Amino acid sequence: MPMESFLSQEIKILAIDDNQDNLITLRAVVSDAIPRARVITAQDGSSGISLALSENPDVILLDIVMPVVDGLEVCRKLKQDGRISHIPVIMLTALKTDRQTRVKALEAGAESFLAKPLDEVELIAQVKAMAKIKESADLQRLEKSRLASLVLERTLALEKELNERKKTEAELIIAKNKAEESDRLKSAFLANMSHEIRTPMNGIIGFSELLKETDIEPDERDRFIRIINGNCQQLLHIINDIIDISKIEAGLVEVVPADFCLNELMDSLAENYRQNASCKGLQIILHKDPHCVESRIHADQTKLRQIMDNLITNAIKFTDAGRVEFGYKIRDDRLDIYVKDTGIGISEEHRNIIFNRFWQVESGLARKYGGNGLGLSISRAFVKKMGGEILVESTPGQGSCFSFSIPYVQSCIKPLSQAKTLPEVTDFTGKTVLIVEDEPDNFDLLNIILGRFHLIVLHAWDGNEAMRIFNEHPETELVLMDFKLPDVPGQEITKQMLQLRPQLPVIATTAYAMHGDREMALEAGCAGYLAKPIRMNELFQIMKSFLN
Ligand code: ADP
């Protein structure tokens, strides 16, 4: 601290003396000599110590001879207390020649001493010197505490930095492991996918070649066609899985609830898989909730069916003997569904990771079961989107049980009364159908199938031509509308046609085959939806429903 600052500051002096007169004299002397001095006084040791604590004086003038607690004891106490030990103490001794007392004063911790009667000049000089000592001690203390807080601050910052570095390091290790795992899975997926795609392709190409031969027996020809068809379905399944997983990753999965009959869905699943299961000698057992007779619910039927398809296909695939059971139960506001098998089971270490995409317990060339490792991760994402969680319990060698629970929302729409169902019409002779299709092969196929039903077929290559033909042919009774047209989107053309003829059945035919396309078609006002590849049976069902 510079000198000027010292001179300009107030000097606080605490005088402790049992003699009131002495105190008055001290105050007068000090105030005269140092105008900026302020003298506070105490007449005994303990109030002196209290004042020292509360006032933080710059100098203490302490009389030695006092009743109760003498000055030496007071000095010791002052010097023992860390809060005030830095305040310089000048002891006031009785006799200049009392050497022993002066030594004791220094031993008690006093910085200086003065003998009575006091020499005013010496007193003032000492007070000033001590005040300076106190000031520099204060500065030192201040600097020390500033340094200490700086060190603390820096230490904390370093600790924080170190923790962050450790965290980043841990995150990097996790990310690296993930990247390596993902890389490994992707390579396995590609190798696997190549196998999964080439296998059905091999069947399709090979048996199509064989079909060209002229001398095949009709039975054999039917068998080849069945094989080609089966392989095509397998390919389609793979493509759908890839589209689904891409949609999941892009966050584009939407739940589209509608009213449907849960028992019908369960029955149709049991029916579809019974043959597959019996080929392996497995039993299919369905348990419907006996308290749920009508079982009309409001949920996303397409996704529910797809989840069940994945779980039942797996259950059959990974079971060599025994049975596959599935069913549902309604528990308050939840719908619990499960698929259980008596198959190979899943070890504990694999029970969670099988839900990760591309993950399969079996890997490498010696794979026995096939598959692309996407079914469970798609199912898990769908269940989650529908408000549930998929779980697995399993005992290796004994079987597995996959279960999930989604919110149960009862449908508020009553099923149509059976009595009102119209009689089936299967003769479509002479009825006119407009096909809007820009792909020649696709048109060819539809044209051949519809020709078999003796329908009159009109054809438009694009949206504008479709509107023209539609206007020229009011006898048109049904439209098969491709949604992806070269000029105007099929949805637009559908809306324009329905504005003119609201009762006209327009059936959307799309090759996107994305879940959600059906809803897009219905939103445009279509009466139905056919995903490509179009199956003859499905087309026939559409004709039956709309051409009567
Ligand atoms: P994929 O069946 O096409 O391989 P999934 O995602 O459906 O793919 O299943 C991932 C893996 O989980 C399977 O490869 C198999 O190892 C295991 N898994 C699934 N379901 C079962 C089951 N019911 N029994 C035994 N293992 C199963």
Image: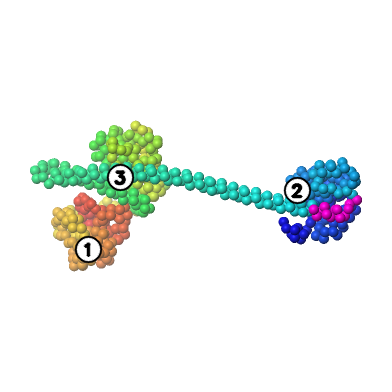
Name the residue that disc number 3 marks. 190
Q: Which structural element holds mark 3?
A: helix
Residue density around tag 2, few if under 14, some if 14–19, many if 20 or more, within 10 Å: many
Using the rendered image of the protein, determine whether residue 328 is visible from the camera's viewpoint.
no
Judging depth in this view, the residue of 124 and 357 nearest the camera is: 124
Residue 462 is tagged as 1
Using the rendered image of the protein, determine whether residue 147 is visible from the camera's viewpoint.
yes
Q: Residue at x 87, y 57 (%)?
A: 29
Residue 86 is tagged as 2
Q: Residue at x 80, y 60 (%)?
A: 36
Please give left or right for residue 23 compared with residue 306 in the image: right
Please give left or right for residue 424 compared with residue 171 in the image: left
Question: Split into 4 quadrants, where in the image is the C terminus?
Answer: bottom left
Q: CA distance from mark 1 to mark 3?
A: 38 Å
- The quadrant holding residue 124 is bottom right
Where does the magenta region start and end?
117-129
Q: Position of residue 400 (x, y in %)?
A: 35, 36
Q: Residue at x 15, y 60 (%)?
A: 456
Q: Nearer the viewer, mark 1 or mark 3?
A: 3
Of callouts 1 and 2, the N-terminal one: 2
Q: Is residue 513 above or below residue 181?
A: below
